[in-house]
Image (cartoon, grey):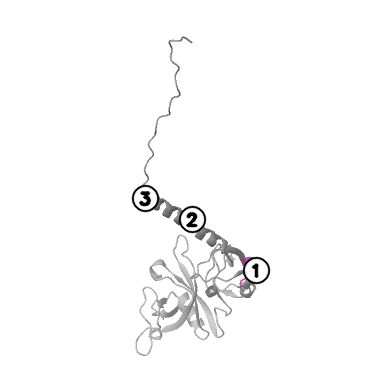
Amino acid sequence: MSPQQAVAGPVAPPRVSARRRRPGVIALSLALIAAGGAGVAVLLLQVGNRTPVVTVVREVQVGQVLTEQDLGEASVALDPAVKAVRADDLKSVVGKRAAVELKPGSLLSPSQVTKDSLVKSGEQLVPIGLKPEQVPATDLVPGQTVQLVQVPAQGAAAAADETADDGAPKTIAGRVVKASTAAPGTGVVVVDVATAAKDGPTAAAWVSAGAVRLVLDAPDGR
């Protein structure tokens, strides 16, 4: 190295000014971290707090007796508002009847089963086919009370034996046991109606003659 050349000294690194963090930003960051941790904790608690319940594994029609093959078990995070049969009680529902149609994949609730036959002693079951224009807009569900009304066959006038003493149409009280879905193509809905045994044959004759209509009673029975 030439004597004339100066020896270079150490080069100081450039100073980078540190950012000043605002207290508000720091507080917000801490709050978000805390909230995230709380959310994770709640999620973990929900995942851990699962309840074994009874599920439906195959379709069961209204009135059908439940078997063990119809039912299964699952462990779910159950909302307190949801009423479901606990897995420990599975044996208690086997042998009971479905009070409503049960669909696979659904939870079984206590109100969906009954120990009673849907057609009681002293009753008969009368199937009634309803055309699309005769089906009420209100869904037909088991337990609804109805009136079967005798009406003149299409194109015929009312006969003397088709009216009561006061001139009103004859009626038979009944209760819906089951209503099918609309048949493809025709849209006909078949409704199984339980009537008093003494009225069953009469109602069946009205149905055969196409001279019956189904009228829903008011929910309070009035």
Residue 207, percent from left and from top: 46, 76
Which of label 1 and label 2 is nearer to you?
2
Specify whether residue 176 is painted magenta.
Answer: no
Q: Camera-side residue: 20 or 157?
A: 20
Residue type at tag 2? Gly
Sooner in the amino-acid sequence: mark 3 or mark 2: 3
Sooner in the amino-acid sequence: mark 1 or mark 2: 2
Residue placed under numbered mark 2 in the picture: 37
Residue 70, percent from left and from top: 61, 66
Q: Which residues are magenta?
A: 65-71
Q: Camera-side residue: 29 or 50?
A: 29
Q: CA distance from mark 1 to mark 2?
A: 43 Å
Q: CA distance from mark 3 to mark 2?
A: 21 Å
Sooner in the amino-acid sequence: mark 3 or mark 1: 3
Residue placed under numbered mark 3 in the picture: 23
Residue 169, percent from left and from top: 38, 83
Residue placed under numbered mark 1 in the picture: 68
Residue type at tag 1? Glu
Q: Secondary structure at mark 1?
A: helix
Residue type at tag 3? Pro
